Amino acid sequence: MQTPEVTDIVDRLRTLVEERYVFPDAAAEISARLAARRDSYPTDLAAFAAAVTADLQSVNGDKHLRLLHHAEPQPEQVPGDDAAEYAAMAQWADRTCGGVAAARRLPGDVGLLEITPVLFPAVLVGDVYAAAFTLLAPVQALIVDLRGCLGGEPSAVGLFMSYLWDHEPVQLTGMYERATDQVRQSWTHAHVPGRRYGRDRPLYVLTSERTFSGGEALAYDVQQTGRGTVVGAQTRGGAHPREGFRLHPHLEATISVARAVSPVSGTNWESVGVTPDVPVATEQALAAAYRSALEHVCRQAGPSAAEARAALDAGALL
């Protein structure tokens, strides 16, 4: 006989899945599986969360469908009040330089911009991106390292891509939302603060097996628009934006409420991940991209070519 607490959590989770999950047919199947397994779940909260997560993902492998166990009690959610979540996200962004772990010029006039742990909402990091791209705008080639980017917010992807494009907007991957039964489009911005890198010079985007969600969205848009070259390993495969719901002081359900839709392919990277244009081991991705960038700079006229040749001759491949 299952405890009333576990039964209540499972029933509320089933309702959330049925009402909110972006795929109604899969939602019905997932809900039925949770109901069938309800009496066999462990009562230890961490083990319970792991078992439920496995069942949530068993139908279609959606990695954003989870029951998360938090060691520390989570505050009550107040409908329509996102102030606490925003404040926590802002503090996280402040502690991590807005997700910009590195923005520097490498020998040979190649820029390196490393994004980790996530692409924070544009409203929080617009000034950080403006500063980073203003610094790197003059380089002859740019490497964007997303190997440690574990997620992100769609507005940040659009803003970031805007610095890699020109003033003429291009359509990016949008979001089909179950609640509206429509695709919310996304475009690059006609104006951005600071300087753009632009769309004409070489761009290399590094990926890894850890790159997920918003990080994948950026790599996918770079690939789909033909803007640059993706170098590294196949990504994790999470293309469904999610919302969090507190079901217990220590348990949070995350439900995918939308799905990404590319205007080019009509699909996304869910479950399969982003396939690199140049597949190499994660730890070799930077060296591979840097060599390619230096070779490009060597073919250009001017003092940067000599510096790039010297870097190649010195084996400065990071």
Image (cartoon, rainbow, N blue to C red):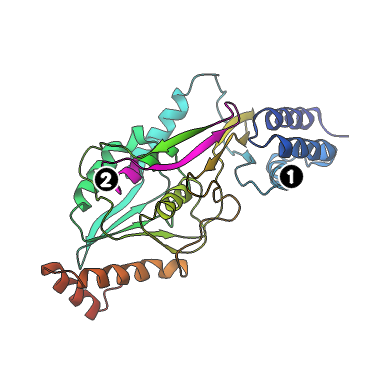
> Which residue: 69% across, 47% down?
60
Residue 201 located within the stretch drawn in magenta: no
Looking at the image, residue 101 sits to the left or right of residue 307; the answer is right
Q: Quadrant of the N terminus?
A: top right
Q: Which residues are the magenta region? A: 159-182
Three-letter residue code for mark 1: Asp
Is residue 171 depicted above or below 110 in this figure? above
What secondary structure is marked by label 1?
Answer: helix
Q: Which residue is mark 2?
A: 166
Please say whether residue 292 is visible from this viewpoint: yes
Q: Which mark is residue 38?
A: none
x and y percent of residue 217 in the render?
A: 46, 47
Q: Which residue is nearer to you in this view: 81 or 76? A: 81
Side of 225 relative to 211 (left or right):
left
Seen in the picture, residue 237 relative to 168 is either above or below; the reply is below
Task: Depth check: give the residue in front, 136 or 158.
Answer: 158
Label 1: how many residues lie within 10 Å, few (<14), some (14-19) or many (20+)?
Answer: some
Q: Which residue is mark 1?
A: 55
Residue 164 part of the magenta-drawn span? yes
| Residue located farthest toward the left when viewing the structure as drawn | 303
**Where does residue 234 sit, x and y in percent of width and height?**
52, 61
What's the distance in space between the residues labelled 2 and 1, CA to CA?
45 Å
From the viewer's perspective, is residue 228 above or below residue 160? below
Q: Earlier in the sequence, mark 2 or mark 1?
A: 1
Which marked residue is nearer to the observer: mark 2 or mark 1? 2
Residue 67 at x, y = what percent? Answer: 65, 39
